[in-house]
Image (cartoon, grey):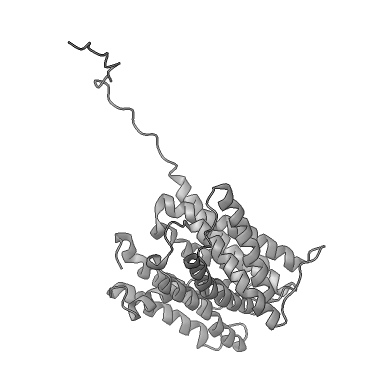
C-alpha cells in the first residue's frame, strides 16, 4: 500500500476574503484634464513656433522627427520598439502621409494666421467629420441624434463664416475654410486606417513612433521642395524652443492617451475633445489677449453640443 502523502496546509475558508483595495478613481479624471490641457497648449506652442521664425514645413519635419524619437526611446525602454516589416512600413507611411504630413502642414500654416481659440474650435470638428464620413461609406449605422450632432457642427461652421462681424478680419474666412482641412484629413485617416487595417502585434506607442518617423521622412522632401527647410541652431530662437517643447509634451500626451484608454476606455478619452476647446480658448485669452465675437461663442456652444451627440452612442459600444 503506497504511503499517504502530506497534502500540505489547507486554506482556511471560514474567513471572508479581504476586500479589494480601492483603485485610483481620480487618476482617469486627472489624465483626462492633462490631455485636454496639453491639446489646448499645443495650439499656443504652434502659434509661437510658426510666428517665431520656424516655417510650417520645417516645423512639421522637426516636430515629427523629435516626437518620434522620444516615443522610440520610451518604447525601447519598454522593449517594444517599432516593427519595420513591409506591412508595418506601408501602414506607417499611409497614416503618416494623411494624419500628420498633410493635416499638420495645414494646421501649422493656418495657426500662424488664426487666433489660438478659433483653431481649437476648428480641430474639435474631427469626431463630427469622422462620423459623417463613416455614414457616407456605410461603416457606421444611422442614428438620428448623432446625425443631428453633425448638423449642429455645420451650423457652427456657418456662424463662424457667414456673419461679417464674426471674425476679427473678414479676410480670415479663407484661412478658416483651409483650417477645416486639418480635422477633415484626420477624420479620413481614422476611417480609412481603422483598427481592422492595423498591423497585428503592435501596441499604440510603437505604432505612433513608427508613424511619426514615416511622417518626418515624408515631410523632409516637402520642406526642401517648398524652400522651407531650416536647420535648428544654437542658441535656439523663441520659435525653436516652442517647437522642442511641443515635441516633448506631445510624447507625454501620447503616453497619457494610451494610459487613459487602458484604464477607462476610448469613449472616456474622447471627452478630451471638449476640454481641449476650453483650454485652447482660455490659453488664447491668457497668452495672446484674444477676444471672440458673440457668433464665435455661439458656434463654440453648437460645436460642443454636436460633438456630445456624435459621441453619445459610443457609451454603449455601438456605431
* Quarter placement of the N terminus: top left
One can see residue 139 in this view: yes
Q: Position of residue 157 (x, y in %)?
A: 47, 82
The answer to which image quadrant residue 142 occupies is: bottom left
Which residue is farthest front?
A: 1
Classify residue 193 as left or right of residue 105. left
The answer to which image quadrant residue 68 occupies is: bottom right
Q: Position of residue 140 (x, y in %)?
A: 31, 73
Residue drawn at the location 46% of the way across and 57% of the way down = 202
Q: Position of residue 137 (x, y in %)?
A: 34, 79
* Quarter placement of the C terminus: bottom left
Pick the residue in front: 16 or 13. Answer: 13
Q: Position of residue 106 (x, y in %)?
A: 59, 79
Residue drawn at the location 55% of the way across and 84% of the way down = 178
Pick the residue in front: 30 or 251. Answer: 251
Residue drawn at the location 34% of the way across and 65% of the way down = 312
One can see residue 34 in this view: no
Pick the residue in front: 243 or 292. Answer: 243
Relative height, residue 66 to residue 132 (above, below):
above
Relative height, residue 160 to residue 275 (above, below):
below
Residue drawn at the location 33% of the way across and 73% of the way down = 146
Amino acid at each position: 500500500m503506497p504511503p499517504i502523502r502530506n497534502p500540505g496546509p489547507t486554506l482556511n475558508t471560514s474567513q471572508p476574503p479581504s476586500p479589494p483595495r480601492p483603485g485610483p478613481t481620480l487618476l482617469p479624471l486627472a489624465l483626462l484634464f492633462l490631455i485636454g490641457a496639453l491639446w489646448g497648449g499645443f495650439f499656443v506652442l504652434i502659434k509661437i513656433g510658426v510666428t517665431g521664425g520656424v516655417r510650417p514645413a520645417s516645423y512639421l519635419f522637426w516636430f515629427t522627427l523629435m516626437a518620434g524619437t522620444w516615443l522610440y526611446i520610451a518604447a525601447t525602454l519598454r522593449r517594444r520598439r517599432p516593427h519595420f516589416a513591409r506591412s508595418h512600413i506601408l501602414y506607417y507611411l499611409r497614416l503618416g502621409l494623411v494624419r500628420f504630413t498633410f493635416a499638420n502642414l495645414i494646421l501649422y500654416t493656418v495657426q500662424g494666421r488664426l487666433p489660438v481659440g478659433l483653431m481649437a474650435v476648428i480641430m474639435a470638428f474631427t469626431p463630427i467629420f469622422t462620423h459623417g464620413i463613416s455614414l457616407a461609406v456605410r461603416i457606421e449605422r444611422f442614428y438620428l441624434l448623432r446625425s443631428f450632432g453633425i448638423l449642429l457642427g455645420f451650423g457652427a461652421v456657418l456662424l463662424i463664416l457667414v456673419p461679417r462681424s464674426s471674425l476679427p478680419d473678414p479676410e480670415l474666412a479663407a484661412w478658416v475654410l483651409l483650417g477645416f482641412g486639418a480635422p477633415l484629413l484626420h477624420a479620413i485617416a481614422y476611417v480609412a486606417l481603422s483598427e481592422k487595417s492595423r498591423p497585428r502585434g503592435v501596441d499604440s506607442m510603437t505604432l505612433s513612433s513608427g508613424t511619426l518617423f514615416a511622417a518626418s521622412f515624408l515631410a523632409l522632401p516637402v520642406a526642401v521642395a517648398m524652400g522651407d527647410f531650416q536647420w535648428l541652431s544654437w542658441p535656439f530662437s523663441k520659435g525653436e524652443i516652442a517647437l522642442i517643447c511641443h515635441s516633448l509634451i506631445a510624447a507625454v500626451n501620447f503616453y497619457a492617451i494610451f494610459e487613459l484608454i487602458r484604464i477607462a476606455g476610448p469613449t472616456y478619452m474622447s471627452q478630451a475633445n471638449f476640454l481641449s476647446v476650453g483650454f485652447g480658448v482660455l490659453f488664447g485669452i491668457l497668452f495672446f489677449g484674444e477676444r471672440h465675437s458673440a457668433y464665435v461663442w455661439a458656434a463654440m456652444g453648437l460645436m460642443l453640443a454636436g460633438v456630445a451627440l456624435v459621441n453619445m452612442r459610443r457609451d454603449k459600444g455601438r456605431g
